[in-house]
Image (cartoon, rainbow, N blue to C red):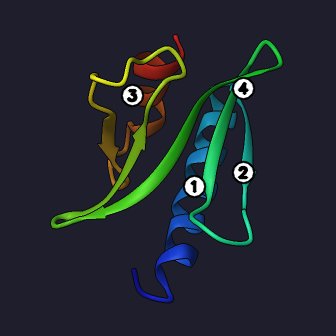
Amino acid sequence: MSARDPQEQFIHLVRLSWDLRGLGVCTSLVLPPAGQPVLEVMSGGETRVRIAVIRRACGWTFVWRPWWARLWRPGEGVWTGADNAADVIVSAAIA
């Protein structure tokens, strides 16, 4: 991970948070002193899912693993450049 990666992750998560806000979803951005930033998506006062941003060969991807997922179940994701990323996350991870 390059020195710019955490800043790029932050920018993608802020944009996603703003898009989710437009859909009526409460979010909280977590910026740990060490490690990658994550976006916590809230529902009913509880964290429903934590979204991270990872770089893959073809670009940046939002990934999440809902709290109810089992260890054997792979995580889910959507490209950060997708116009409907917030809608995909709401329907797949929150609803």
Return the disc, 1 or 4, that comes first in the chain's sequence: 1
User: Where is 20 relative to 12, above or below?
Assistant: above
Say what amino acid the circle numbered 2 marks. Answer: Leu
Is 45 positioned to the left or the right of 24 in the image? right
Return the disc, 2 or 3, that comes first in the chain's sequence: 2
Residue 62: percent from left, percent from top: 40, 47
Say what amino acid the circle numbered 3 marks. Answer: Val
Residue 50: percent from left, percent from top: 57, 37
Q: Which residue is mark 2?
A: 29
- What is the CA distance from the residue labelled 3 to the residue labelled 1? 15 Å
Return the disc, 4 or 2, that comes first in the chain's sequence: 2
Nearer the observer: mark 2 or 3; the answer is 2
Q: Which residue is mark 4?
A: 42
Return the disc, 3 or 4, that comes first in the chain's sequence: 4
Return the disc, 3 or 1, that comes first in the chain's sequence: 1
Q: Which residue is mark 3?
A: 88
Quadrant where the N terminus is found in the figure: bottom left
- Identify the secondary structure beneath mark 3: helix
- Identify the secondary structure beneath mark 4: strand
- What is the CA distance from the residue labelled 1 to the residue labelled 4? 15 Å
Say what amino acid the circle numbered 1 marks. Answer: Leu
Say what amino acid the circle numbered 4 marks. Answer: Met
